[in-house]
Image (cartoon, rainbow, N blue to C red):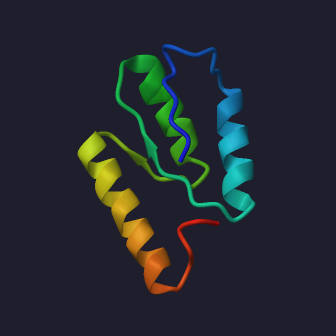
Amino acid sequence: MPYFVFQDTPLDEGIVEVLDNVMHAGKPILVCAIGGPYTKRMAKQIEQTGIPVFSTVDEWVAAAEALYLHGKNLGFSTHQ
């Protein structure tokens, strides 16, 4: 899963469209957004596309684990 930090990389609002396109290509996406006003604004924009955004690492890890286990139960390989 990709990991990025809004403050440390030159990400702008364009990332919302990129994530939306990836999600509509059938790839699951989970986002963890921790930060100040800019990060909260970006998180809101991402959520509006239907991508889940978590506000703590613990929540994000739990969601990632659930997604992994669901895929495993469906018979998906973890090495695709």
Q: Return the residue found at the far front.
A: 79
Q: Return the residue found at the far bottom.
A: 74
Horizontally, is 59 left or right of 28 in the view? left
Q: Quadrant of residue 68?
A: bottom left
Residue 75 at what x, y percent from top left?
Answer: 53, 85
Q: Residue at x 55, y 53 (%)?
A: 29
Horizontally, is 9 left or right of 35 in the view? right
Q: Residue at x 64, y 66 (%)?
A: 80
Residue 23 at what x, y percent from top left?
Answer: 66, 56
Relative to 65, residue 1 above or below = above
Q: Nearer the viewer, residue 31 or 69?
A: 69
Relative to 3, residue 68 above or below = below
Residue 24 at what x, y percent from top left?
Answer: 72, 60
Q: Quadrant of residue 56?
A: top left
Q: Nearer the viewer, residue 78 or 52?
A: 78
Relative to 17, residue 13 above or below = above
Relative to 7, residue 47 above or below = below
Q: Residue at x 65, y 37 (%)?
A: 16
